[in-house]
Image (spheres, rainbow, N blue to C red):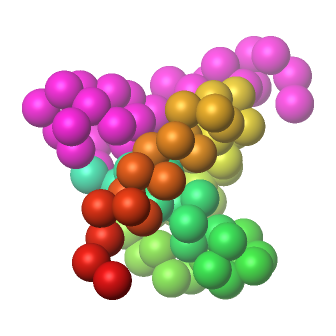
Amino acid sequence: MATRARQSLEKLITRNPDICGGSPVIAGTRVRVSDIVRYSRIHQDSARALKALTSINTRQFEAAMTHYRAHRPQIEAEIKEDEAAAPA
């Protein structure tokens, strides 16, 4: 993906310590990038994951996945923390 297009998508991702503990989210929502990654894994197909994520659009989904690829270690750590904190 061209740098300019990637930067445009990255603008759709925000971080605010007062929203979802500072996790990266889709701008204007509380939908975390890590949650989108999990949906993508569960549904094993981006189209099916996007259909399940009714509160975001295709461009927002692409922005989240672009952010994930650029910040994979941090997002993976967040996913692991969430899984460890989940009740058994």
Give the percent coordinates (x, y) of residue 5: 75, 26
Give the percent coordinates (x, y) of residue 36: 52, 60
In percent of the image, x 37 and y 29: which residue is there? 14
> Is 65 on the left-hand or right-hand side of 74?
right
Q: Toward which corner of the image does residue 41 lie, by quadrant?
A: bottom right
> Is 62 on the left-hand or right-hand side of 36?
right
Q: Indicate yes or no whether the magenta region holds residue 5.
A: yes
In percent of the image, x 27 and y 78: which residue is there? 87
* Residue 72 vertical position relative to residue 88 in the rendered view, above or below: above
> Is 16 on the left-hand or right-hand side of 5?
left
Q: Which residues are magenta?
A: 1-29
Quadrant in which the N terminus appears: top right
* Residue 25 vertical position relative to residue 84 in the rendered view, above or below: above
Residue 16 showing in the rendered view: yes
Q: Indicate yes or no whether the magenta region holds residue 9.
A: yes
In percent of the image, x 70 and y 28: which residue is there? 70
